Image (cartoon, helix red, strand yellow):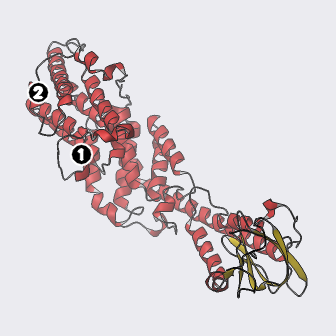
C-alpha cells in the first residue's frame, strides 16, 4: 500500500542516530515514558502521537515490544483475547514492515489499531509475588510442599534438567492444576473463589523465575546453571537451555490435560508474543506474559469485545497519516534549524581564528589547545549530546577535507625534535620562530608552520597534556616570536629535517 508524498517521513539521519533522538528532535526514552503514561490513562490521541513519533524514527520493533510488555503487565485478563489479536496483527504486517521501516502504511495502521485498543482497554495491573531470602532456603520451602512425590514434574522433565528444580516445578504444576479445578468447582456452585484461596501458583512461578535470575547472575556464572536443550524455530538455539522453556512446557502440559481449545489458543498466543525477537535481556520485561498464562489456565476468562470501541478504532486508523504529516514537518524544521546552528557556529569560529589576539598568558596551562577545544565544540554544535545527526556528520567531513592538505607534512614526513643529551628532562628551551603561514587546525592538534633555530616545519601542539606550549601565536609575516619547548619524551614538535646535535 503506497503512501502519498506529503505523508512520507524523509530524513538524512541513520537508524542509529534516530534511536537516541527521534525524528522531531526528542529524546527516545522520554517519548517511551510519555507513550506508557498515555496508554495507562486512556489518552488515545496522545498515545498515537508518541507511537507514531517512534515509528517515524525507525523504531517500530521497539514499539511492538513495549506494547506487548504493557498489555501483559497492565491489562492482563481484562481483555483476554488481545494477545491473540496482537500476534495475528504483528505476523500479518511483518513482510511489509521489512520493506520500509518508517513509511509502511500497513505497519502504521497496525500500530495505530493496537495503540487505540490498548488505550481504551480496562487496566488491571498484575500482582507480583515477592521472593525473599527466606524463600530461597530449601528447608523452609520444603515445609510448604503439598506433595512429596514428583509425578507431575516427571512428565515435563528431560535429561539434563536440574534435579534441584524437580520439587519446585512439581509444586508449581500441582498448584496450577488444583487452582483450575477449584475455580471450575466454584463456578459450578456460583461462588467467587473459595477452594483456590489457599493455592499459590503465582508464588511458585515467581520462585522459579527468581531462581533463574539468581543462578544466571554474574556472581554465580561459574555454576553453569542450565536446563535440558529445548530447541524451537521461534528462538535462537543459544537460549534453548534457559529455564523459561521448562516453565512453558509445564504450562502447555497442564493446558493439554485440561483439553480446552480456548485456553490452548490463548496460551499459544502468549507464548508467541514471548518469543518475538527474544533475547535473554527481555526476560524481565516479558515475565508478565507467564503470569498471564497462569491466569488464563486457572480462570479461563470469558470472551470480551477485543476492540472495545470499534468505531473509535476505525476513526483513529483512518486519520493516522495526518499525525505522520505533522511529524514530517517537525522533522524537516528541526533538521534545518540544526544545520543553520552548525554553520553559524563554524563561521563564528573561523572568524575568531583569523582575527584572534595573538597574545596568550605565558604560563597558563589551561590555555594550551584552547583553539582546539573551541573547534571540538563546533564539531558537536547544535546537536544533542546523545545523538549527532547526519548534518553534523557531513560538516565533520567538510572539515576533514579542509585538514587533508596539512596531513602529509604533519604526520607522514614529520620527525620528532628531542632534547640534547646534556639537557635535563623537565626543563624548557626557548626557540625563535617565524610564522610562514596561517596556523592549521586539526582534530586533536593546532599546527603552527614555523621557521626556527631547530629547523623549518610545523610545531604540533596536542590538545591535552601538551609538552609543547606556544607562549605567543605567531602572526603571519616576518615578525619573529618564540615557542617554549618543554623537554621530555612526549615532545611532538615536527620538522622537515632533524638538526645537528639532537637525538632522534
CA separation, marks 1 and 2?
A: 25 Å
The part of the image, by quadrant, that contains residue 224 is top left
When asked about the image quadrant of residue 219, the answer is top left
Q: Which mark is residue 272?
A: 1
Of badges 1 and 2, the one in the foreground is 2
Q: Looking at the picture, tell me which residue is in the foreground, 210 or 290.
A: 210
Residue at position x 37%, y 22% in the image: 132
Q: Residue furthest right?
A: 479
**Which quadrant is home to the C terminus?**
bottom right
Q: Residue at x 37, y 31 (%)?
A: 122
Residue 304 visible to the viewer = no
Q: Is residue 72 left or right of residue 294?
A: right
Against 254, is 225 above or below?
A: below
Left or right: residue 149 compared with residue 431: left
Q: x%, y% of residue 191?
A: 21, 12
Looking at the image, which residue is at 60% across and 65% down? Answer: 335
Horizontal arrangement in the rendering, residue 166 relative to residue 12 (left or right): left
Residue 186 in view, yes or no: yes
Image x and y of residue 488, in percent: 72, 68
Helix, strand, or loop for circle 1?
Answer: helix
Q: Report crowding for label 2: few under 14, some 14 to 19, many 20 or more residues within 10 A (C-alpha).
A: many
**Residue denoted by label 2:** 152
In percent of width and height, residue 73 lies at 36, 34
- Residue 155 picture quarter: top left
User: Is residue 285 or residue 377 the one in the foreground?
Assistant: 377
Say which of 112 and 169 sits in front.
169
Amino acid at each position: 500500500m503506497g503512501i502519498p508524498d506529503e505523508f512520507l517521513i524523509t530524513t538524512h539521519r541513520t537508524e542509529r542516530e534516530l534511536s537516541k533522538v527521534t525524528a522531531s528532535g526528542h529524546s527516545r526514552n522520554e517519548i517511551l515514558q510519555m507513550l506508557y503514561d498515555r496508554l495507562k490513562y486512556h489518552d488515545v490521541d496522545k498515545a498515537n502521537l508518541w507511537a507514531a513519533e517512534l515509528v517515524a524514527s525507525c523504531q517500530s520493533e521497539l514499539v511492538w515490544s513495549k506494547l506487548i510488555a504493557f498489555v501483559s503487565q497492565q491489562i492482563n485478563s481484562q481483555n483476554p483475547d488481545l494477545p491473540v489479536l496482537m500476534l495475528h496483527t504483528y505476523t500479518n504486517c511483518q513482510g511489509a514492515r521489512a520493506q520500509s521501516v518508517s513509511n509502511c502504511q500497513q505497519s502504521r495502521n497496525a500500530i495505530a489499531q493496537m495503540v487505540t485498543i490498548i488505550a481504551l482497554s480496562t487496566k488491571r495491573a498484575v500482582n507480583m509475588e515477592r521472593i525473599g531470602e527466606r524463600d530461597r532456603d530449601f528447608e523452609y520451602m520444603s515445609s510448604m510442599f503439598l506433595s512429596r512425590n514428583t509425578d507431575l514434574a516427571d512428565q515435563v522433565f528431560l535429561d539434563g534438567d536440574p534435579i534441584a528444580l524437580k520439587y519446585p516445578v512439581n509444586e508449581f504444576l500441582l498448584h496450577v492444576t488444583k487452582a483450575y479445578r477449584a475455580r471450575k468447582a466454584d463456578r459450578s456452585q456460583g461462588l467467587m473463589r473459595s477452594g483456590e484461596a489457599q493455592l499459590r501458583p503465582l508464588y511458585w512461578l515467581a520462585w522459579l523465575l527468581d531462581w533463574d535470575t539468581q543462578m544466571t547472575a554474574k556472581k554465580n556464572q561459574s555454576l553453569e546453571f542450565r536446563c535440558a536443550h529445548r530447541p524451537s524455530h521461534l528462538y535462537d538455539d543459544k537460549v534453548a537451555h534457559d529455564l523459561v522453556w521448562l516453565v512453558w512446557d509445564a504450562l502447555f502440559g497442564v493446558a493439554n490435560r485440561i483439553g480446552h481449545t480456548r485456553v490452548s489458543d490463548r496460551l499459544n498466543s502468549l507464548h508467541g508474543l514471548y518469543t518475538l525477537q527474544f533475547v535473554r535481556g527481555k526476560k524481565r520485561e516479558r515475565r508478565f506474559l507467564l503470569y498471564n498464562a497462569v491466569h488464563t489456565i486457572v480462570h479461563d476468562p470469558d470472551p470480551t469485545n477485543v476492540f472495545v470501541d470499534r468505531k473509535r478504532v476505525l476513526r483513529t486508523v483512518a486519520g493516522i497519516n495526518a499525525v505522520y504529516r505533522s511529524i514530517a514537518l517537525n522533522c524537516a524544521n528541526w533538521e534545518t534549524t540544526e544545520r543553520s546552528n552548525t554553520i553559524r557556529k563554524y563561521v563564528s569560529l573561523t572568524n575568531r581564528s583569523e582575527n584572534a589576539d595573538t597574545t596568550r598568558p605565558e604560563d597558563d596551562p589551561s590555555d594550551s589547545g584552547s583553539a582546539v577545544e573551541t573547534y571540538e565544540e563546533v564539531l558537536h554544535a547544535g546537536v544533542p549530546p546523545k545523538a549527532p545527526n547526519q548534518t553534523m556528520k557531513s560538516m565533520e567531513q567538510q572539515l576533514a577535507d579542509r585538514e587533508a592538505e596539512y596531513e602529509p607534512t604533519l604526520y607522514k614526513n614529520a620527525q620528532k625534535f628531542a632534547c640534547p643529551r646534556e639537557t635535563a628532562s623537565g626543563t624548557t628551551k626557548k626557540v625563535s620562530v617565524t610564522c610562514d603561514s596561517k596556523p592549521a587546525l586539526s582534530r586533536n592538534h593546532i599546527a603552527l608552520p614555523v621557521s626556527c633555530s631547530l629547523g623549518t616545519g610545523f610545531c604540533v601542539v596536542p590538545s591535552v597534556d601538551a609538552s609543547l606550549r606556544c607562549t605567543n601565536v605567531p602572526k603571519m609575516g616576518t615578525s619573529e616570536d618564540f615557542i617554549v619547548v618543554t623537554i621530555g619524551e612526549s615532545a611532538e614538535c615536527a620538522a622537515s629535517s632533524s638538526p645537528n646535535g639532537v637525538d632522534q
